[in-house]
Amino acid sequence: MTEDDDAEVDLCTEASGLLCQIKRHHFFVIGKFPVREAVPKITMSKKNSMYLVEKVNHGNTSAEEEERPSLDSSLLKASRIPISSKNAAEAFSSHQQANIDVGDLKDRNSLDVNGLWKKLNKSEKEKLELTKLLNEEVKKYETQMAKLRLSMEKVEDIRQKLEFEITMVKVEAGKDKHAAEKKMEQMQKMNEHLRAQNAEMLQRMSDIEKALEITKKARDEDQHVFESDLSEREKILQNYDKEIKLLTSEKIHLEHVLQVQENTLMELQKKLLQQETGRKKDSETLKIQATELEYSTEREGRLKLELENAMKRVKSLEESIESEREAHLKSKFGSEIIQLKFHELEAELQAEKTKTANAMCAMETVKKQLGELEETYQKERTKASDSIEKLHK
């Protein structure tokens, strides 16, 4: 309700209260001293030595007397008091004074009653106007109440829908909360698992660092040993290079000597071929002579002499051939000895080359192992750094 409505309601309540007060006041005044009713009049009659108060009615019915409160009867009952003869003068004087007061009171009451009737009529008119206004306001408020009831019904429907949606949202929120709690438990388990993995990785990293330190120390020691071995092998290789140079120079000298001996051998072989060709010729001649000896016996002596001479020549040739063979064998034996020495030197050189090659291969394998160890160390280090970064994130 608005402030105007509150003011109208307050005005109505004040008007109704004023009307009630007017009615009560009118009832009290009219009940005591109405205009058309009897005015209480005190008459004195000497009956049973008592003064009685009588009430004179001027045209009032018994119904009107019954409607008004019996204030006069109470006054009569209260006025029935025994009066002695000594106080008769005082009672009469008081009666006259009371009649005077009643007259004045009647005049004043008539003026008050007329003013009150005017006020009552005015208040009745105001009441009618207010009732009209109130009826119009009531109709207006009834229409507004109907509209408000419809809106309240709509609001109630909306409220029920909202309550249903709220319950559904609460159910979904409960489900989401349950799922979130499960997810939190899973995340906590995962976090614990990751912490365990982190501790394990840190332990593994420390172990790997210790192993790397050990391997690094061993690698340094091995590298130092290999460097010392390499320096010794380089010294040996230098000595072998010197020996190889000497052997190559000796080989060149021996090859030169061998070439010279081969040249002499070739010359001797040529001579031997020439001697063999001569011997073949001599043998042919001997054959011819033998045939001639067979065919001729006459010339036997001469042929024997020639044969002896030929035999002598053959023996000398055989001796010369044997000497040449011995010289050839000696030269061949010397060349074979030189070749054997050369082959031995080549075998030693090849053995030293194989030793140096094996040493170089060992150095290469050691370098490869060191490179692989460094690569594994770098990989493990990167893995550990990545795991630490993930855990920090």
Image (spheres, helix red, strand yellow):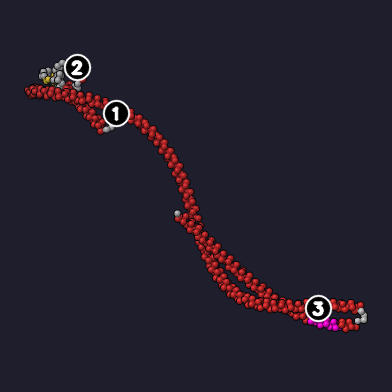
- Image height of 169 relative to 63, above or below: below
- At label 1, which amino acid type do we have? Tyr
| Percent x, y of residue 12 | 23, 28
Say which label, 3 or 1, has the lower sequence index: 1
Instruction: Give SS at disc 3.
Output: helix
* Magenta region, residue range: 308-321
**What's the distance in space between the residues labelled 1 and 2, CA to CA?**
47 Å
Q: Which residue is drawn at 17% across and 17% down?
A: 60
- Quarter of the image with the C terminus is bottom left
Whether tag 1 and tag 2 are in contact, CB under 8 A, the answer is no
Instruction: Give SS at disc 2.
Output: helix
Q: Taking 318 as reference, is 48 left or right?
A: left
Q: 343 or 335: which is nearer to us?
A: 335
For residue 278, which numbered disc appears in the image? 3
Which quadrant of the structure image shows residue 61?
top left
Residue highlighted by disc 1: 141
Decide if residue 225 is in sight here. Answer: no
- Quarter of the image with the N terminus is top left
| Percent x, y of residue 325 | 77, 79
